[in-house]
Amino acid sequence: MSFFGRLARSLLGRGDRPADASAGANAFWLYVQCTQCDEKIRVRVNREHDLSAEFDGGDLPASYFVHKEVIGHGCFRRIKVDLHFDGRRILTEQKIEGGAFITQEEYDAPDPFEANGDDAP
């Protein structure tokens, strides 16, 4: 990997530390990829502070919802993410517009151009 590739990974939080090391007990990481530029982006979701409660007439929330608009470092297109959780704050549904959900393994996979020392496609 080139010097600039290693520097970018360390500044953008894609180093060798565990993915959930800074997420906290009530948070998790979501991984998305832009459909326009293929940039991979890691998004932190905190179950305590990011979720909006939805009520069905009772005193306790029946479900929760979060909407995030994600912008990467390469292009500045918005990726719209909607997440739905049940009353126990467990993820039940996810939708994305302008991107695709990817796994942590896909996020961590090296860029083939970086692996060859190339800087451009």
Image: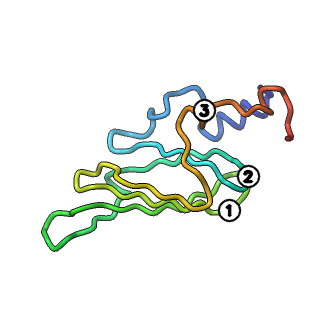
- Circles 2, 3 touching at the beta carbon (< 8 Å): no
> What residue is pinned by disc 1?
77
Q: Check residue 37 in the rendering and tell me which mark sits there, or answer none.
A: 2
Q: Nearer the viewer, residue 96 or 19?
A: 96
Sequence order check, earlier mark of 2 and 3: 2
Q: Is residue 29 above or below residue 99?
A: above
Quadrant of image for the C terminus: top right
> What residue is pinned by disc 3?
108
Give the CA separation, mark 2 to mark 3: 17 Å
In percent of width and height, residue 103 lies at 53, 38
Q: Element at badge 2?
A: loop
Residue that appears at 49% across and 28% down: 18
In percent of width and height, residue 7 lies at 72, 33
Q: Is residue 52 left or right of residue 56?
A: right
Sequence order check, earlier mark of 2 and 1: 2
Q: Is residue 119 left or right of residue 96?
A: right
**Number of other residues with Cα within 10 Å of mark 1, as a class: few under 14, some 14 to 19, many 20 or more:** some
- Circles 2, 1 touching at the beta carbon (< 8 Å): yes
Q: Nearer the viewer, residue 43 or 81?
A: 81
Q: Is residue 92 left or right of residue 11?
A: left
Q: Element at badge 1?
A: loop
Q: Check residue 91 in the rendering and tell me which mark sits there, or answer none.
A: none
Residue that appears at 73% across and 56% down: 75
Give the CA separation, mark 2 to mark 1: 9 Å
Which residue appears farthest toward the bottom when viewing the image? 57
